Image (tube, helix red, strand yellow):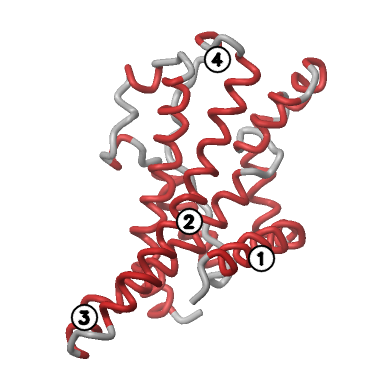
Amino acid sequence: MEPVLIIRQLAIVAVPILIAIVLHEISHGYVANKLGDPTAKMMGRLTLNPIAHIDIFGTVLMPIMIFILTSGQFVFGYAKPVPINPYNFKNPKRDMAISAVAGPATNIALAILSIILLRYIITPVASFVPDDIAAMLFKPLEMMLTASITINVILATFNMMPIPPLDGGRVLMGLLPHRYSEALGKIEPYGMIIILVLLITGIASYFILPIISIIMGILEMLFPK
């Protein structure tokens, strides 16, 4: 991909991916707080201020690196993990799994919101305004919302991979018997390395892309053009 195109695409996806990963993390802390763990709230992590959530590697460098290495096919990143203390939960295994699901669920909700804004508000309104205004204001919004749909579906799908520390790994740990859950937890220190290898080598695409296609297909049926 040409450098100019890379810069242009990164500019388009920067805001959607920041919103996606920040709200993803806030949702973890919000649900955890509702389930009895106020750790994230006490540490000021239930804020929309992105500075509180940005991780230099996961929020900035990693998405750019993956975007370039995959020629724009994938964008994956993460914010600083919201601190959760499972010992504050009444049912630690169950409630940890529920708080983990909140992140991907938020991304799917953002994808749906982006579709609604794009197809039923921004695009129709753009057709009634002068071409210069449409090109200057509405076209960038349409491109960002289109990117937001894809980004949020990808983030939701990737985060539900059953590898800790991803949300899918935490959900699986909450569902498995203690012995197996404990064994799966030992993978966590190496989880992000495994994910990066799967992404860079393209192995992840063999089982992630079909799921992404299914989710996108369902959204297309629910919200037709």
Q: Nearer the viewer, residue 186 or 148?
A: 148
Q: Residues within 10 Å of mark 4 (few under 14, many from 20)?
A: some
Q: Earlier in the sequence, mark 3 or mark 2?
A: 2
Residue 192 shows up from this direction: yes
Question: Picture coordinates of residue 96 (x, y %)?
Answer: 58, 23
> In the rendered image, which residue does mark 1 sit on?
213
Camera-near label (4 vs 2) is 4
**Helix, strand or loop at mark 1:** helix
Q: Earlier in the sequence, mark 4 or mark 3?
A: 4
Q: Earlier in the sequence, mark 4 or mark 2?
A: 2
| Position of 35 relative to 139 (above/below) | above
Which amino acid type corresponds to the residue marked 1 in the rendered image?
Answer: Ser
> In the rendered image, which residue does mark 2 sit on?
63
- How far is the residue under mark 1 from the one under mark 4? 34 Å
Camera-near label (1 vs 4) is 1
Which amino acid type corresponds to the residue marked 4 in the rendered image?
Answer: Pro
Q: Name the disc covering residue 86, or none.
A: 4
Q: Name the disc covering residue 136, or none.
A: 3
| Residue drawn at the location 64% of the way across and 30% of the way down | 170
Q: Earlier in the sequence, mark 2 or mark 1?
A: 2
**Helix, strand or loop at mark 2:** helix
| Residue drawn at the location 55% of the way across and 9% of the way down | 87
